[in-house]
Image (cartoon, rainbow, N blue to C red):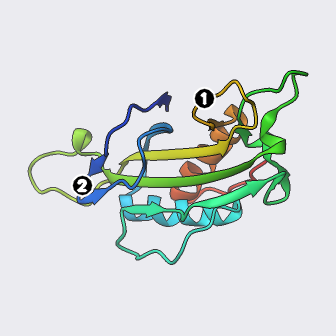
Amino acid sequence: MRLFRTLPAFTLVLGACASTFSGAGQEFEDTIAAPPQRVIQATATVFRDAAIPVGSVSPRATFLHSEPFRVRRTWGADPVESRLECGRDELGEPLSGHLEVVVRIEAYARPDRSREPVPNPTPAASSNFLLRVEATALDPRESNPDGTLECTLTPTFRDALLTAIRKAAMGEPVSAIP
């Protein structure tokens, strides 16, 4: 699993789907041993279990996104600071527990053709998976001139989310996401 990098401002195009992100955010990549459609169906299920709102998903879909959603103090049943990092205040306390954060998440899956034989191609046995996360809040500190604050997924939540997606796509049992 490749972890993440902070993204520069650009529009991502993967397959025929264009990102609606403003350009800031995080990106996580993985290769999952399942066809793209199964990966996206599993992602939708995991998103719903993690209180990430998604609409209906076509069985043939290879792209999924959440509508922008707001979290404040709690995300699902968990405190926001267990899922998002937004920096710390002057006393060293996490800011994420005191802010209203707008979150958007996109997921893409495409066939991993690097391991498929060229003659008689079959449906992809594995998928290249990309998860993009954008989380922003209004920064209450006067030291921030533009007034916004970029937040990131906590490593614990990120790892739990990616592990759950991978396991669900491969038909393995998935434990609750913290």
Identify which amino acid the numbered label 2 is placed on: Gly
As displayed, is residue 156 above or below residue 64?
A: above
Judged left or right of residue 46, residue 97 is right
Question: Which secondary structure, mark 1?
Answer: loop
For label 2, the residue is 15
Question: Which secondary structure, mark 2?
Answer: loop
Identify which amino acid the numbered label 1 is placed on: Pro
Q: Residue at x 67, y 32 (%)?
A: 155
Q: 10 Å neighbourhood of mark 1: few (<14), some, or many (≥20)?
A: few
Total numbered badges shown on the rendered structure: 2
For label 1, the residue is 145
Residue 63 on image: x %, y %: 39, 61
Which residue of the protein is positioned furthest toward the right in this rendering?
91
Q: Residue at x 85, y 58 (%)?
A: 77
Q: Residue at x 63, y 51 (%)?
A: 164
First in sequence, mark 1 or 2: give its number. Answer: 2
Residue 62 on image: x %, y %: 36, 62
3D distance between C-alphas at marks 1 and 2: 37 Å
Q: Nearer the viewer, mark 1 or mark 2?
A: 1
* Nearer to the camera, 165 or 52: 52
Judged left or right of residue 98, residue 140 is left
Which residue of the protein is positioned furthest toward the left in this rendering?
119
As displayed, is residue 71 above or below residue 138?
A: below
